[in-house]
Amino acid sequence: MKNNIFSLVVLFVITIITLSIFMGCPGAKRDELEFLRSEVDSLRTDIKDFIVESNRLEFDNYVYGSKLNLNNLYKKSPHLFTIENINTLNALLKLEQRPERVDRLERLKVHVYSEIVKKATSKLSDKIENQMSSGLVHTDRGAIPFYNMRSLIANELSQPKREKLFKSMNSIYKELNSDYRRLFQIRNKIILDSLGFKSFNQFGAMIRSENFNKFSKSIEGFINSTHDLYFVLLDDILRAHKLSRDNFYRYDVYRILRNDKFDKSFPKDSLISVWKSSLSAMGFEIDSMRNIVLDMENRPTKNPRAACFTIEVPTDIRISIKPIGGFDDYAALFHETGHALHYALTTEEFMEFQYLGNYTSSETYSFLFEHLLDEPGWLKNFLGMKDVDIKSFIKFRTFQRLYMARRYCAKFLYEYQLIDSINIAANKYSEILSTALGYKPHPSDKNFYLDDVDDFFYTVDYLRAWFIEAMFKTKLRELFGNDWFANKSLAEYLQDYFAAGQRFYIDKFVQKIGFIDLDPKFLANEVNSMRDFARRRN
């Protein structure tokens, strides 16, 4: 009897202890969950403040040539981009259940990873940017701001003089490449030794959310499938410039892509009015969008590459254009407008969907607007171009579109093997790009082997955007007809995309457009259609 009572007491005690442990666990987990959420919310706020301030600094450097000092900004925020914060995010990821919360955390983690690497080389990056924005190239025309050199070469009619200007940049690049090399070596060491990635490419694939092995095969397929068409187009445009593949060099590319014979069709004084009327025809009234600011001043120290700065999404979006004349200014303004509308019209409230994630969707919108220049109806209705001039321009744009796509394909294939072959990278760069683009290698081509590398494979976002934009255009033509760009319902339709901010991953973005998977053949088809239009006799 006593034994039975003792057994019951023991059983009761064990049950009480078990229940206490069982009941205690959820409470402890909830406490841990709330603590981690609080820590990450604080981190989010501080990271957004950092992004806004760094965007302001980069804008001032880009547009006004102000000294860039991101290194100082990183020093002011030593607690933000650390391995400890990666561990905190991983701990919270184990507890979160809702897909949206998990998505936000994953984006934040990827951003912290990339910023850890950037922070380690911020002083060197500042030096490089400041060298370029303040650098002077000594030529027989005097000291020329480094940022003005490409437009100078593009507007030079004499090939020997183009070569001389091209070679005059050697001294600038000698110092730049010394710093670039150190930057890449430091970044690679951090990624492998401190962050524990197997390779720089694995890190880049994480940043871009892409399977690089699969992607590289797709890129190689696009290059192979467009080879014959590209070289037919190249030979044709070279003849027009009294060149051939036997005497065609990289510095000639600036000239043939400038193609100032079309300047009369793209008058500088009409740029803003054409821009506004085109957007109005789609249903966008740009004058009423006070959150978009356009800077078109032609300052000597201003970076010539057009850019959109998302200073603070969606309230402060800025476009920077450095006009050089002709259709390039129109293409640049419309491209950056695609970015600006995307960010200015987003309704996303979470920082991660405003700023973070991949940029393929935003680049897609930008190319959609830039490629208005490839629409015969737009050229006729908004610029008043004659049919014969439209065909001539579309013929040129066919080459330009394919040139740029193949150039970025070659850039990706080069970058994909860069770290593994850093000691022979300059030769590889010259070889891969000259082979894909058809110009003869020149010793000064090697200057660009590190300068022409975008941070953590941003090249991938450009390429995916080119491919998806051609798919998107197919959808728009089905919905709105060939003159899709002159339908005021377009703004409402695109607003559904813009509202999502950076939320879309590639697969979801492609599916929303109405397709199963990204397919480069749509871009090849688009280029072929442009060529067919230019060859029509009536």
Image (cartoon, rainbow, N blue to C red):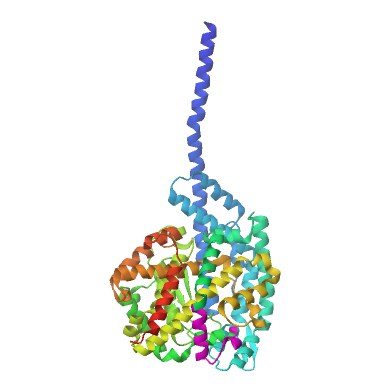
- Horizontally, residue 279 falls left or right of residue 135, namely left
Residue 493 on image: x %, y %? 32, 66
Q: Is residue 81 above or below residue 369?
A: above
Query: Residue at the location (31% across, 75% down)?
Result: 482
Q: Outermost residue, top direction? A: 1
Magenta includes 501?
A: no
**Residue 371 position within the rendered picture, expressed as x and y whole percent measured from the top left:** 41, 77
**The C terminus appears in which quarter of the rendering?**
bottom left
Q: Is residue 498 left or right of residue 448?
A: left
User: In this rendering, would 423 be left or right of 496?
Assistant: right
- With respect to residue 460, does 66 lie above or below? below
Q: Quadrant of residue 424?
A: bottom right
Is 231 included in the stretch rendered in magenta? yes
Which residues lie in the magenta part? 229-250
Rendered residue at 49%/57% (across/down): 45
14 vs 423: above or below: above
**What residue sits 40% from the left and 73% below the top?**
368
Asked if residue 370 can be seen in this view, the reply is no
Task: Place residue 120 in its image quadrant.
Answer: bottom right
Q: Would you identify the image quadrant in which residue 422 lies?
A: bottom right
Q: Is residue 439 visible?
A: yes
